[in-house]
Image: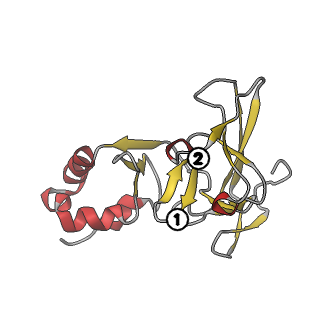
Amino acid sequence: MDSLRAGDLIQTADGRSVAIQRVKTMVAQPGPAADPFIIPAGRFGATAALPISPRHRVAVPGRGLVEAREIGGLARLPMRAAWTYYNIGLPNWETDNLIVGGVEVESLAPVERVRLTLAEFRGLLVKKYGAEAGSKAVLDRVLATCRLGADGLVEAPVVRRGGCLNSIKNSTF
C-alpha cells in the first residue's frame, strides 16, 4: 500500500481498472477509537489476518458495506504505538470498491460524511428539494444510492459532485 501513488492504475472489486485519485495516510494513536479490528483469514475471503480501522466499511454478504466496528465477532488489536492507516481514493466512492487481502472494502470517501436519522434525512430532502422529495418513492430511490447503516442512520457526503443526492436533483416528482 505504501508504494501506491495518485495516477497508478488499480483494479476495482468488480474488475475495472481505474486511476487512483489520491492516497491518504493517517497516523493513529493507540486507543479504543483507533485500534484496528482483525478480519481473520478465511472470513469474507481474507487470505490472511487483515487489520482494518473501526470505521472502514467491509462487504458483508447479505448486509452490504458495514463498518468494521459493526460487524460483530471481530477481535481488536490493541496498539502499543502509533499505527498508520492507508486509504485509496478512486473516481467513484459509491461504486469503486477494492479487494484488500481478499476482502472487498470501500475506497476512500472524497469528503466528510454526515450521519442523520431517516427523519432528519427526509427533512433535508424536503428543505433542499421541496415537499415531494420527502415522499416514500423518492426516499427509496435516494436510499438506493446513499448508505443506510446497520444502526439505521443515513450516511451521505456533505459536499460531493455526483453524490447520492444527485439521484433526485432536477427530477420531476
Residue at the farthest left position: 131
Closer-to-camera residue (135/51): 51
Say left or right for 41 vs 35. Answer: right
Task: Give neighbour class at mark 2: few <14, some 14-19, many 20+ (Cα, 10 Å).
Answer: some
Is tag 1's residue or tag 2's residue first in the polypeptide sequence? Answer: 2
Say left or right for 122 vs 66. Answer: left
Task: Give neighbour class at mark 1: few <14, some 14-19, many 20+ (Cα, 10 Å).
Answer: few
The residues bearing labels 1 and 2 have C-alpha atoms spaced at a distance of 16 Å
Query: Percent x, y for residue 151?
Result: 37, 45
What amino acid does circle 1 point to?
A: Pro
Viewer-nearest of discs 1 and 2: 1
Say left or right for 139 vs 79. Answer: left
Q: Which mark is residue 61?
A: 1
Which residue is identified by label 2? 56
Residue found 73% across the figure and 27% down from its top: 79
Residue at the farthest right position: 3
Q: Which mark is residue 9?
A: none
What amino acid does circle 2 point to?
A: His
Query: Percent x, y for residue 10?
Result: 75, 66
User: Is residue 169 in view from this perspective?
Assistant: no
**Rendered view: 155 above or below 33:** below
User: Is residue 71 in view from this perspective?
Assistant: yes
